[in-house]
Amino acid sequence: MKKILFTSESVSEGHPDKVCDQISDAILDACLAEDPYSRVACECFTTTNLLVIGGEITTQAQVNYEQIARNVLCQIGYTSDEIGIDGHHCEIKNVIGIQSSDIALGTNKEVGGAGDQGIMFGYASNETEGYMPLPISIAHHLVRYATEKRHSGEFQWARPDMKSQVTVDYTDALHPRIDTILMSIQHDPDFDEKAFKDYIQNVIMQDVVKKYGMNTDYKVLINPTGRFVIGGPHGDTGLTGRKIIVDTYGGSARHGGGAFSGKDPSKVDRSGAYMARYMAKNIVAARLCERIEIQLSYAIGVKEPTSVFVETYGTEKVSKDVILQAIENEFDLTPQGIIDTLQLLRPIYQKTAVYGHFGRGDIDLPWEKLDRVESLKKYL
């Protein structure tokens, strides 16, 4: 019998794409901190010794975009060209414009419509304590833990750029096992390769796996090319919004294609996906089903979603019609309703820009709250 294998990946704060996500969301937070009604669509691009900040921003806030970017780079650990980029001295180009007045016509307070058309998905399952798929949960945990060890100084020779990949064996669906863990971690040129790899396998991997109560006889791959010194923006270009599967469910659920970082909550690509996750998590926690994917769709300038769709994979305890009725009765899916429900006009976004937007046990996020469970139980 062929094994049933599923794989998810994650990346660290030092990955070039995630550098851009964090800068975009740090700029968004700075705008919202002074002007909660800021309209922000901020994109970044980075390569060797260069960062470009672009997009459209309309705000009353006085924000030093360049200084915010340099702060983020240095906090990550990018303080020299040798490591990946020099946050103190790299070239930064600011090409930010203002938001189109045509978009503003449909998203102002009076109209309250969506900031764009689009489809977005939310997902939850009872597979883990955080109601997330197991592979992406472990993948995130690995790079987050490795990064914490790097910042503390305990993880010798490690540099900021890291990736993880976790393959889970679902052949026995009730007793999944880890099949393979892959980690690629940037390192100093003068490192002890054996000690470095031993630490990754025997401390980082083993500590994380034990927290999930999983098997420890998995296959291990560490820096398969043999060397990973050149990393960060010097090793590869980075773009805001290029890690959308890392940001969500690791491929276990479908994705509407819209990125999150750098976008204020009038953009339903972001707020709609957060609301769909919020509904999905509370529905599973209320035991209306064991696993659910919710799709929402919107039209620019229109308040109500153009569609709501649910898939429960045969795990529903009540009919899908009942679940759809519960969604209609219990949740306000207008863009303003979503913003109000989840209190999204706050500077809370930079912390979501790395290690996933969902299932986070390390930070407090409004769409992760289980405060609708009791009201949903009446539909059982």
Image (spheres, helix red, strand yellow):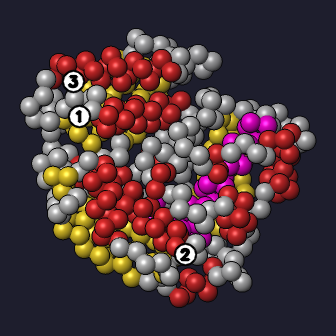
- The reply to whether discs 1 and 3 touch (Cβ–Cβ < 8 Å) is yes
Up the image or down, 178 lies above or below 8; here it is above
Q: Position of residue 154 (x, y in %)?
A: 28, 28
Disc sitting over residue 35 in the figure:
2
Could you give the CA–CA distance between mark 1 and mark 2, rounded to whole angstroms?
A: 39 Å
| Residue where numbered disc 3 is placed | 196
Q: Amino acid at mark 2?
A: Asp
Q: Is residue 278 magenta?
A: yes
Disc 1 to disc 3, C-alpha distance:
8 Å
Q: Nearer the viewer, residue 184 or 264?
A: 264
Comes first in the chain, label 1 or label 2: 2
Left or right? Give the position of 344 relative to 181.
right
Q: Residue at x 54, y 57 (%)?
A: 348
Type of the residue with mark 3: Phe
Q: Is residue 178 left or right of residue 205?
A: right
Camera-side residue: 303 or 7? 303
Q: Residue 344, how many percent across, how many down? A: 62, 62
Q: Position of residue 188 (x, y in %)?
A: 14, 36
Residue at position x 51%, y 21% in the image: 211
Q: Which residue is mark 1?
A: 158
Q: Is residue 166 or residue 128 the one in the foreground?
A: 128
